[in-house]
Amino acid sequence: MQSLYSNGFEHIYDAMYKTFINYEDEYEFYSKIIDEHGKTNVLEIGSGTGNLAKKFINSHFNYTGLDLSYDMIALSKRKNPKGNFIQGDITNFKLENKVDSVIITGRTTSYLLSNNSVYKALNSIYKNLTSDGVLSFDFIDASRFFLEIKEGKFFQHKATINDMFYNRESYMKPDKQADNFMFNWNATYFKNENGTLVKVTEDNSTVRAFTKNEWEIFLELCNFKLIEFIDRKSYAFDTYVVVAQKK
Ligand SMILES: C[S@@+](CC[C@H](N)C(=O)[O-])C[C@H]1O[C@@H](n2cnc3c(N)ncnc32)[C@H](O)[C@@H]1O
């Protein structure tokens, strides 16, 4: 798991990602999909620090957030005392009550590194969805993003929050040893302390991109009907959103 998801670094994640991601737009986007299918309750997988949760909690939906990181869950609860959050793994979770929609947000699918973990995730979601339940999630599009990072590419992301300045320097390159479309993401985080950039932490992780065709097959094999792919660029990546329905 990325180092920014625990051990106190979740606060830095929270601060930085609030400037990278427009959670109001995220809410408008996913709530429209859920409303269009007449669903009223939603499970968000990879709920992070509860920024999208806040919008859902203050809406007409019945919301639950699930995340692998205990620290992300603890911070979400502190920020949203009325919210319902549970620690769990996308590949193996069981809710007390089934939900009629599931969203996997913020490219959390990038952590499904093996095909086995994709099947396990889709099977867990299937079991926790009511009949005709809707599943929507985003993924990094390998067919476009890998062309961009083909030779390795540096990216810089800056964020200023309450007079605190953060900087992330990333280097991304396809991992050609891997059995699927994985890439290495080396990131170093800095913050500005009294005019000096100080290193906060470093992350060397491997994450996964997918093609649309892979998801067509995964969904079919796990008994989901693909409804549509929506082309939706996220802050740093070429991204598609999938909308599917339990068969
Ligand atoms: C890039 S963050 C996105 C967080 C949030 N959706 C957002 O947009 O700010 C990915 C999240 O997925 C969570 N995660 C990673 N692997 C997971 C797994 N196997 N099951 C559930 N959550 C996982 C991480 O802890 C992290 O909070």
Image: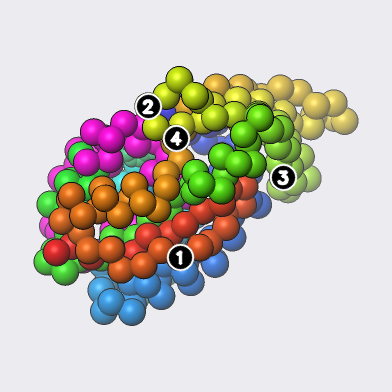
Q: Which residue is mark 2?
A: 179
For image coordinates 62% across by 47% down, the residue present is 236
Decide if residue 15 is in sight here. no
Q: Nearer the viewer, mark 2 or mark 1?
A: 2
Mark seen at residue 159 = 3
For the N terminus, give its image quadrant.
Answer: top left
Give the residues drawn in magenta, as a range.
90-119
Mark seen at residue 86 = none
Q: Nearer the viewer, mark 3 or mark 2?
A: 2
Q: Which residue is mark 1?
A: 230
For image coordinates 73% across by 38% down, the residue present is 156
Ligand 1's quadrant: top left
- Mark 1 burial class by Cα count in 10 Å: few <14, some 14-19, many 20+: few
Secondary structure category for the residue under label 1: strand
Q: x, y percentage for residue 14?
A: 56, 44
Q: Amino acid at mark 3?
A: Ala
Q: Amino acid at mark 1?
A: Ile
Alpha carbon distance from label 3 to label 4: 29 Å
Q: Amino acid at mark 2?
A: Asp
Alpha carbon distance from label 3 to label 2: 35 Å
Q: Amino acid at mark 4?
A: Phe
Secondary structure category for the residue under label 2: loop
Q: Nearer the viewer, mark 3 or mark 4?
A: 4
Left or right placement of residue 142 versus residue 61 in this view: right
Residue 200 magenta-drawn?
Answer: no
